[in-house]
Amino acid sequence: MHGEIDQVRNEALAALAAAQTSSALAEWHSHYLGRRGVLTQLMRQISQIPPTERPAYGQAVNALKEELSAAFTARQQEVSAQELAQQLAAETVDVTLPGRQPTLGTLHPVTAMIREVTGIFARLGFQVVEGPEVEYSAYAFDALNIPQDHPARDVWDTIYIDSPGREIVLRPHTSPMQIRVMEQRQPPIRVVVPGRCYRYEAVDATHEWHFHQIEGLAVDEHITMADLKGTLAAFARQLFGQERRVRFRCDYFPFVEPGVDFAIDCMFCHGEGCRVCKGTGWIEILGAGMVHPQVLRNVGYDPERYTGWAFGMGVERLVMLKYGVPDIRLFYQGDLRFLAQFSRTTVW
Ligand code: DAH
């Protein structure tokens, strides 16, 4: 009988040494030490043994049981240590790997230009204000000295909104904010107004049906054309280079008198004449002029006491001139190959 015990011992210890995982160990345990396991069966066989040998047999089986239990506990510790080591190795994070670079967004070139221009005027003492894109005709035209049946109204190809009662438009320029600001405040006024405008326009390389303007307005006692010229020259030189020469020529806008067209010498050919300035040596930047006395009267200002000037410029045009963009449609096609080229433009 002892021979069998020895055989079970050898087999069990060999199987234990071969068990590599905790589930193999659990199987081993139920096979040898479980309630119906090999050891229980060995113990049951005691009835087939001559009574005199039973105590020795029982002791031997019990001793084996203890030995195997102890061996099991030891092996269990080894295996769980091994398993932990394997798990740690598998789950290792290499903290020295460089991270994935997130793609950084950039400001749209029109947004960047609005910030640059309004920044220049802010440093000249102007406040930045914004107004509605959906506007009353009364503000977009009438109060600006463009009456209903005046031919000048045709200059602005306006998109009208179906509205019973007061006529409403998508503003075709930022000039209506001149009226809104003057209605709400008393002079001195110095504001710039960036904003989106809309026109019923056949789209081509230089025309979009929606675009941006920046309006300027200064009203106070003793404001003269000289202030306008000095301010616009300072602005143009900050944006396009200190060496810029400036030109003011007569032009017509119903809300100013006199009205001017403001140009700088071409920064590409320095006045020689090239493709950008269409051979003239000059590039027109904006329209401006002394606020028409009728416009001042329309907001209840006394034109004998107050004078002022205003200007309006197209933002896309400024970006096109500054960076040589050939087609206005590029701004609104969402093509990142175009937009990403402006990632280094100045912003604040
Ligand atoms: N609002 C004009 C336009 O859209 C631009 C303009 C011209 C604005 C002269 C002004 C100005 O304030 O004085 O064509």
Image (cartoon, grey):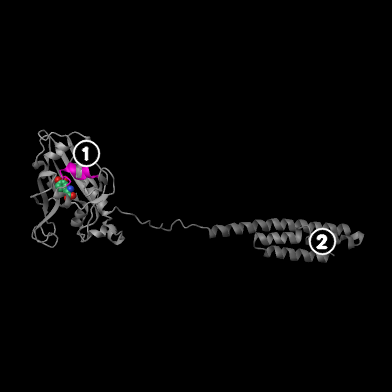
User: Which class describes the residues within 10 Å of circle 1: few (<14), some (14-19), or many (20+)?
Assistant: some
Q: Is residue 243 visible?
A: no
Q: Which residue lies furthest to the front in this view?
A: 164
Residue at horizontal 11 percent and vertical 41 percent from the top = 227
User: Which class describes the residues within 10 Å of circle 2: few (<14), some (14-19), or many (20+)?
Assistant: few
Q: Quadrant of residue 278?
A: bottom left
Residue 222 locus on image (x, y percent) = 10, 35
Residue at horizontal 82 percent and vertical 61 percent from the top = 41
Residue 181 locus on image (x, y percent) = 21, 38
User: Which residue in the protein does label 2 denote?
Assistant: 41
- Secondary structure of the residue carrying tag 2 is helix
Amino acid type at circle 2 is Gln
Q: Nearer the viewer, residue 70 or 299?
A: 299
User: Which residue in the protein does label 1 denote?
Assistant: 181
Please state if 98 lies on the left or on the right of 333 as rendered. right
Q: Which of 337 and 197 is in front in this view?
A: 197
Report the quarter where the N terminus lies.
bottom right
Residue 290 locus on image (x, y percent) = 11, 42
Measured in 3D between alpha carbons, the distance from the residue under mark 1 to the one under mark 2, in whole angstroms, is 102 Å
Please state if 337 lies on the left or on the right of 218 as rendered. right
Residue 83 belongs to magenta span: no
- Compared to residue 182, the image places residue 240 above or below, namely below
Please state if 151 lies on the left or on the right of 33 as rendered. left
Q: Is residue 42 visible?
A: yes
Residue 138 belongs to magenta span: yes
Residue range highlighted in magenta: 136-148
- Secondary structure of the residue carrying tag 1 is helix
Amino acid type at circle 1 is Val
